[in-house]
Each structure stands twice: as C-alpha cells, then as structure tokens.
Image (cartoon, rainbow, N blue to C red):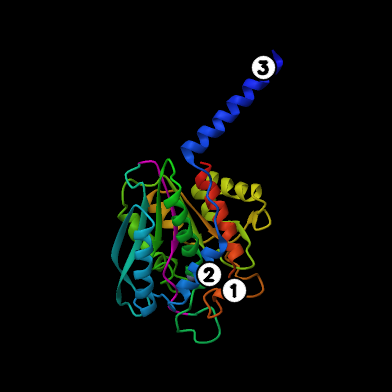
Amino acid sequence: MKKNKRKNKVIIVLIMLLLNSVMFGKTPVFNGDSAYQYLTKQTNFGPRNPGSNGYENCKKWLIGFAEKNSDKVELQKFIGVDPKSKEKISMTNIIARFDPKNTERIMLSAHWDTRPWADEGNYKKDEPILGANDGASGIAVLLHIMELLKENDLSFGVDVVFWDGEDLGRSGHPYEFCQGSRYYSLHIIKPKPQEGIVIDMIGDADLKVFFEGNSMEFNLDLMIDVWNIASKLNYGKYFIKKYGPTMYDDHVPLSYIAGIPTIDIIDFKYPNENVNYWHTHNDTADKCSPKSLKIIGDILIYWLYHR
Ligand SMILES: [Zn+2]
C-alpha cells in the first residue's frame, strides 16, 4: 500500500512535469555574448542623443530588429524639448509587443537615447557621450530577450519598450529627464501592463545592484521577488539586499502617472564609489561585460518563465 502510494506520487509528478513542458516549453537560455554584441552594435553608431546621426541610424536598426523579433511594433512619436537650447526635438518611443491583445501583460523597458553632454566628466563636457552602459546596456539585454520571447511563448503578453529622451535633462532638474516614459504614461497603449521592470546602467563590468528607494514604494513585492531570484541563481553577490541610491528614472512616471507599478534595476555607482564613468566620455563598451549582461538576462528570463 505504502509502496503503491509512492509509485502513484512519482507518476503524478512525472505527468505534471510533462504537462508543464508541453504547456510552457522550457526556459530559454540567455547568452551574454549575444547581448554584448548588441551593446557594441549600438555604440558603433556613435553617440545616440536625439537629433544626431547616430540616433537616426540606431533608430532605424532598432525598429527593424523589433519588427523581426516581436508580434507588433508601435512607434510613439512625440515632440520633446532640449532644456538647454529650449528647442523642440522630435523623438520616438519604440514599443515591441508580444501577444498584443492579451489583457494579462507585463512591461520590460530601458532607454535607447544617450546623453548629449559629458557634464560629470572633466573634458569635452559639452559633447555627447557614447553611453555604452547608460543607454546601450539595457537595450542590449532587451534585444536578446526579444529573440528568446519570439521562440518561446508565454501565457501572458509582454511589452518591450525602448524609451526616448530619458537622458535629456540638466543636472538638478529631474523633471526634464524621462521625456519618453512621461509621454507614454499620458498616452498608454492598451491593454495596459499590470507591472513592469526598468533596467538602466546594468552593463558595468563591476556589477552591484542595490535596493532602489522608489521601487520599494512602487512595487515592493516585485523588488523582493527579483532579489530572491538573484539569490536562487547564485547571483547574490551582485544583487545586494541593502539600500542604494534613490533614482528618478523611467519607473517614476510609469508608476505615478501610468499606474504601472514598476521597479528600476540600476547599478548607479559606475564603476564604484571612488571612480565615476557616469555621464562622462569614459562610458565606453570596454567598461561593460558580457557577464554582467548575462546576470541581468538570466534573472529576467527566470522571472518571465516562472511566473
Ligand atoms: Zn544617464
């Protein structure tokens, strides 16, 4: 009797595993080198601040990639402002949608524009930066995730969004930043995602991601989930369960205005507390690593395929 019960249990578990793999497929594997190639592909266009040549060329490439690797692409064109010259600039959010009619959905996003100034550096402060980490890294991870989503269906919908005009603000003026996510938040493309994750500055070869203050307020459960996934995948030393800086990033308009509770995965100390490459001409591809991109990719893929 006892033995039979155990046998039945084993059979039930096997059937469940089989059903699980038939219904949901298997968890795809994120490749850090593929993501890193998408990082250098972007930096090879040069600086991608709105209106520049690099920006226009990169936009064309990103739209082509999105059209090939998602179910539906929406281009959200809007007029932003350069806060220094006060000139109007036309900008574009790129929204790649998977299972676009599904009302149960989540959002993954990053900014694709780069900063027009190197104002935190000590030379050529008025010239645009390459933005390998601050810009290209988040998009690189999302591009490779899109390839994996295209081949491995989920039971819910996903909006993968590339924000424009995130870094077009003067230091000390937070409301000049995040122009694309603010525009989207006032013009949501329905069905509206229930929650979201922003990734920003996650390519740093010396990766250390801390709890971010606004994320804790917007979606504490999701933040805890993500850090627990990191521990489970043996990435605990990169995802530290301690307070880091509180950021004004794209998750603020998304949570406050759009009502999409969103967390920000960001490693703001780039590369560490003593040295700074952020908003300088040192933000180049050699300061980023395939390994860091893989850590972020693995965590996001685990989150997507174990929900
Ligand atoms: Zn920035």
Q: Is residue 50 visible?
A: no
The quadrant of the rendering that contains the N terminus is top right
Question: Which residue extends farthest top?
Answer: 1
Tags 3 and 1 touching, CB below 8 Å? no
Between the C-alphas of marks 2 and 3, the distance is 57 Å
Between the C-alphas of marks 3 and 1, the distance is 59 Å
- What range of the chain is rendered magenta? 103-117
Instruction: Give the residue number, with chain letter if any, for mark 2.
Output: 133
Question: Which residue extends farthest right?
Answer: 2
Residue type at tag 3: Asn
Mark before the other along the chain sequence, 2 or 1: 2
Q: Residues within 10 Å of mark 2 (few under 14, many from 20)?
A: many
13 lies above or below 253: above
Quarter occupied by residue 10: top right
Q: Is residue 17 magenta?
A: no
Residue drawn 35% across the image and 65% down it: 64
Mark before the other along the chain sequence, 2 or 3: 3
Query: 121 or 164: nearer the eye?
Result: 164
In the rendered structure, the answer to whether residue 257 lies left or right of residue 208 reads left
Q: Position of residue 90 (x, y in %)?
A: 29, 71
Residue type at tag 1: Lys
Residue drawn 29% across the image and 65% down it: 78
Mark before the other along the chain sequence, 3 or 1: 3
Q: Nearer the viewer, mark 3 or mark 1?
A: 3
117 lies above or below 188: below
Instruction: Give the residue number, with chain letter if any, for mark 1.
Output: 287
Tags 2 and 1 touching, CB below 8 Å? yes
